Amino acid sequence: MKREELKELGLNDDQIAAVMTSYGKEVNPLKEQVDSLTSERDNLKQQVSDRDGQLDDLRKNAGKNEELEATIKQLQEDNKAAAAKYQNDLAAKEKGFKIEGALRDAKAKNVKAVLSLIDTEKVSVQKDGTLDGLTDQIEAVKKSDSYLFDAKNAGQPIKFGGNFGNGNNNNGAGKDDIASRIAARFAGTAE
């Protein structure tokens, strides 16, 4: 209702003021209620929109959490595999060092050459650190390729002697022909 409409009906200004006051008393609470309900409706729409956004975020995060959990699980498995590989590599190197040490102790001249003749897969390291299955293989290599190991009589001198085709082995009763010739040369009495 507007004041112009009331003037057209033939009401004077005092009557229009009284009608507007009465109208305002009834309409203003309704306007306030409508404004309140509109505000509440807009607020609820915003809350629904916020909740929908939160649900979308939760769905996305739930997917991410599944991906994150899968990634974490994969990383844990990778770490376990890497730790196991590291332990196996460490055990293999320790086994290799022990085998090489045992070959040196067995007086191998060339450890790498002897190592190529040994099946290291058949050798195992016991809990006390000893090697199982190596002694038999070393003995077999010593029998088949003894030149790869130092001889047990390594400290004995080499003997020279024999007839080297000069037909003169009577130079000094049992002395070696080569040794007597060398001695004679040093003495200046070379033949």
Image (cartoon, rainbow, N blue to C red):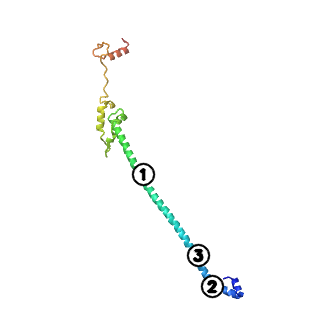
On the image, the x and y values in percent for residue 71 come to: 45, 55
Tell me the number on the disc at residue 78. Answer: 1
Residue mark closest to the camera, 1 vs 2: 2
Tell me the number on the disc at residue 135. Answer: none
Q: Nearer the viewer, residue 180 or 126?
A: 126
* Residue 114 as seen in the image, left or right of residue 25: left
* Residue 6 as seen in the image, left or right of residue 163: right
Q: State the SS at label 1.
A: helix
Crowd tier of the residue under label 2, counting other residues whose Cα lies within 10 Å: few below 14, some 14–19, many 20 or above: few
Tell me the number on the disc at residue 25. Answer: 2
Residue visible at 47% across and 60% down in the picture: 63
Task: Identify the image quadrant of residue 13.
Answer: bottom right
Crowd tier of the residue under label 3, counting other residues whose Cα lies within 10 Å: few below 14, some 14–19, many 20 or above: few
Crowd tier of the residue under label 1, counting other residues whose Cα lies within 10 Å: few below 14, some 14–19, many 20 or above: few
**189 in relation to 1, above or below:** above
Q: Quadrant of the N terminus?
A: bottom right
Q: Quadrant of the C terminus?
A: top left
Residue visible at 37% across and 14% down in the picture: 185
User: What's the residue type where badge 3 is placed?
Assistant: Thr
Task: Identify the image quadrant of residue 143.
Answer: top left
Upstream in the sequence, badge 2 or badge 3?
Answer: 2
**Cα–Cα span, label 1 and label 2:** 77 Å
Q: Which residue is mark 3?
A: 38
Upstream in the sequence, badge 3 or badge 1?
Answer: 3
User: What's the residue type where badge 2 is placed?
Assistant: Lys
Residue mark closest to the camera, 2 vs 3: 3
Residue visible at 36% across and 45% down in the picture: 91
**60 in relation to 30, above or below:** above
**Cα–Cα span, label 2 and label 3:** 20 Å
On the image, the x and y values in percent for residue 106 come to: 32, 35
